[in-house]
Image (cartoon, rainbow, N blue to C red):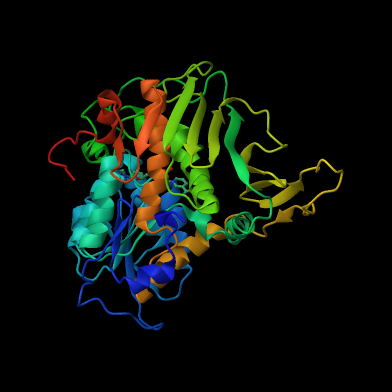
Amino acid sequence: MGDANMDRREFVRWGAAGMVAGRFVVQPARRDERIRGANDRITIALIGAGRQGLGDLGNAMRRPDVDVAAVCDVFQPNLAKGAAMAPKAEQYGDFRRVLDRKDIDAVIIATPDHWHAAQTILACEAGKDVYVEKPISVAIGEGRKMVEAARKHSRIVQAGTQQRSGKHFQQVAELVKGGRIGKVTQVRSWNFGNESPDGIGIASDSAAPPGLDWDMWLGPAPQRPFNAHRFGVDPVRWSSFRWFWDYAGGMMTDWGVHWLDIVQLVMGVDAPNSISAMGGKFALQDDRETPDTLLASFQYPGFICTYENRTANAGAISGKSNGILFHGTDGTLFVDRQGFEIIPEKSRTGTTTVDRTQWLQVENSNQHHQDHMIDFLDCIKSRKAPVSEIEIGHRSTTTALLGNIAYRTGRRIEWDAKDEKIVGDRDASRYLEREYRRPWKV
Ligand SMILES: NC(=O)c1ccc[n+]([C@@H]2O[C@H](COP(=O)([O-])OP(=O)(O)OC[C@H]3O[C@@H](n4cnc5c(N)ncnc54)[C@H](O)[C@@H]3O)[C@@H](O)[C@H]2O)c1
């Protein structure tokens, strides 16, 4: 089993031991960190009160032992939405003032992707536990530094790849690992939709809207004039910062990371060894930078995996617009957020070795999101490793980022997962790090 699937008991046994480049590295646990009782309260803050942040906050607030002491956003209308959910919380525009507060145990970081690394590392340094949204970083090097900060400061850091907390995803992992569909040699994952021809449209640079600190939104990303699509916040759709390389990685890291995270969980691996990708912006007439059509392939030991994204035709696979298919010698297993089913192979003798399962429908397809936050809050108290411990989140994000590196360079990438290096390709290796705009650094 790959180290990203480290057993949770294993983590506890090692205390604050970290897994760096495939090895256990023992670091002393913080002596002042105590295991808290069920009646102890947890004081949290939200950094980034956009669509996902408000959802995360709502999930945390379901717990009676949680107090929300602060909400922080650089955009006043979103800050007001967070404050409306948590009226007793102090309001902040600068997250560093939140981290200064000694009474805050943990922060939820739901800012755009380009902020995750710096904010997580600063939060760890300030002694906070962290729930950081996926993808955990926009460059592989900064993701590794997040893991190191969590280890150095003995922090609980949960990545927002919440499907790992989905009971039916865990059941699928048990079935496949138990041999239910035989030997799996191919995995396909996909998201399809149709936004053609206009996509998000085109926005000219303009003055920033009132109540927005644009410089603090850009943070470590390159300085540039305000642009409504780069900022992205929109009343009717998910923010479009996702489609600009300075802040994110398109569908590969937005949705692809969720599916690849489950592929790695189910297959018991934590890194591909070779990656290639093709695609382009073929149909959408908008100003996004990331592709509207993408096919990325990942070679793992013993099987291949693809992630496909199409945004200009919604034609489904197996009647599903998104999901994962595991193709085994005895059967095919389909899974998405709604449920899963197994379709047996017809054997050459005419009998089947696997029974077809009924479609197993989950009761609430958002339950895994709530459970993921509850797992984080439980781990704050127990000091155990959460389900998507930051090393696991880093490995899943890394795989998605490698898909983008293969796409952007147009080359097959050979990945040395132990040393987190691209083999023999200096040009592609440039993408492992990114430049930070001062004063920000990691
Ligand atoms: N786990 C999931 O399934 C899931 C789903 C959606 C989004 N996400 C992730 O959540 C994150 C946020 O996405 P979103 O769609 O909610 O975006 P959003 O644009 O709606 O929200 C981001 C918020 O962060 C604020 N912000 C930016 N810089 C800040 C700073 N320095 N300090 C404080 N606030 C700052 C913005 O003003 C905005 O209100 C992304 O990383 C995204 O990938 C995860």
Determine whether, in the image, residue 220 is placed left or right of residue 409: left
Q: Residue furthest front?
A: 349
Q: Is residue 101 above or below residue 394?
A: below
- Quadrant hosting ligand 1: top left
Relative to the observer, which residue lies in front, 325 or 178? 178
Q: Identify the image quadrant of residue 137.
A: top left
Front in this rendered view, residue 262 or 97 = 262
Q: In the displayed orientation, state which residue is furthest to the left.
A: 439
Q: Is residue 101 above or below residue 325?
A: below
Q: Residue at x 42, y 24 (%)?
A: 288
Residue at the (21%, 36%) spot, across then down: 215
Q: Is residue 186 left or right of residue 34?
A: right
Q: How many marks?
A: 0
Residue in the picture at 77% in, 54% down: 357
Dividing the image into 4 quarters, which one contains the C terminus?
A: top left
Q: Position of residue 380 (x, y in %)?
A: 35, 70
- Residue at 48% over, 68% down: 62
Compared to 335, does 3 lie above or below? below
Q: Is residue 311 visible?
A: yes
Percent coordinates x, y for residue 150 in the rendering = 26, 59
The quarter holding residue 151 reads bottom left
Give residue 267's position: percent from left, percent from top. 54, 50
Where residue 48 appears, x then y in whole percent? 34, 50
Can residue 289 be seen in this snapshot? no
* Outermost right residue: 350
- Return the residue nearer the eye: 260 or 4: 4
